[in-house]
Image (cartoon, rainbow, N blue to C red):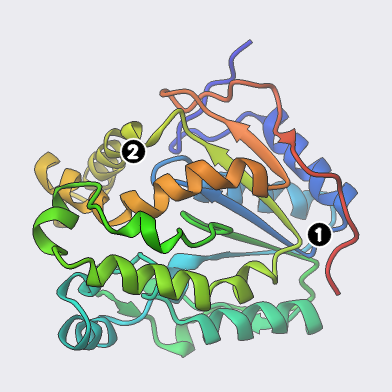
Amino acid sequence: MATPLHPRSGFSDDVVAAVLADVVASGARVFAISGVQGSGKSTLAAQLAQAADAHGLRTAVLSIDDVYLDRDMRQALARDVHPLLATRGPPGTHDLPLAFATLDALRDSGAAHLPRFDKLGDQRRPRREWPRVSGIDLVVLEGWFIGTPAEDETALRAPINALERDEDRDATWRRWCNAALARDYPALWARIDRLLFLQPPGFDIVPEWRWQAERALHADTPSATAMDRAGIDRFVQHYERVSRQALRTLPAIADTVLALDAARRPTTPAPVATRPRTSPAG
């Protein structure tokens, strides 16, 4: 029987229990959830943390969004490298040393201040506002391209959408992001003990999922500035290349895969293991 799934209602108890069972059996200290925009990764992360806490595992949730570079830093990249780097999210727009330090502290001592990013203000919240956690047994890390490897250089030559064709004609932006993905992010992926990939039916569903999320955000916060559908369609093109690379590669890289249909319903009762469990990283 198909299990209803929507980011606003959440995954079924059976799915969450299966993910938790995998965490416990693997002994993972850092468990990552990867998935394209709108796939429900932040919802699953919150549900998993609640279930893990009930199981006796003190859990902290960290999103890759929490370590965005501030707007001023991205504006400097936009000025010095390419204008498209003003948009947060693609590889190269994160404060990776902060991510490393946070995860290392949680693994070593179980205690850290968790960074938090103010998306409306487009800057990291002051450190005094970061929650302090201690005694942490499990870290759930979630993000839209976690675990994704860089593309081969030859794949970058031809644009894959209108944004690349019209605003990155010489491929400077996509080459810079891909170089950052190859050079800087493997050290983050290496800090992950086990990876779950939420696999959509394809990239073409992402604009619709992102549009649904935008409407939900506006319904919850009417005062917030909302993008129209054309804005959404342009926005997701910033992430299309790396998202497609994730779709090509992560099913074979992730330890478990949970396939979703266009309505975000799992197509199997539980995540499917693609790699044997191994001892967690020390």
Lower position in the chain sequence, tag 2 or tag 1:
1
Mark sitting on residue 68:
none
Give the amino acid at mark 2: Val
- Residue 152 in sight in this render: yes
Which residue is drawn at the image coordinates 25% and 45% (left, top)?
214
Q: Position of residue 43 (x, y in %)?
A: 52, 45
Q: Position of residue 192 (x, y in %)?
A: 70, 65
Mark sitting on residue 206:
2
Q: Nearer the viewer, residue 206 or 113?
A: 206
Above or below: residue 155 compared with residue 86:
above
Which residue is drawn at the image coordinates 28% and 87% (left, top)?
73
Give the amino acid at mark 1: Ala
Whole-angstrom CA distance, mark 2 to mark 1, is 30 Å
Query: In this rendering, would 78 be left or right of 53?
Result: left
Q: Nearer the viewer, residue 206 or 105?
A: 206
- Residue 118 in sight in this render: no
Crowding at mark 2 (Cα within 10 Å: few <14, some 14-19, many 20+): many
Q: Position of residue 106 (x, y in %)?
A: 72, 78
Q: Position of residue 15 (x, y in %)?
A: 68, 31
Q: Which quarter of the picture shows residue 44? A: top right
Q: Determine whether the residue tagged by mark 1 lies in a helix, strand or loop.
A: loop
Above or below: residue 47 compared with residue 59:
above
Q: Quadrant of the N terminus?
A: top right
Q: Which residue is mark 1?
A: 28
Q: Determine whether the residue tagged by mark 2 lies in a helix, strand or loop.
A: helix
Crowding at mark 1 (Cα within 10 Å: few <14, some 14-19, many 20+): many
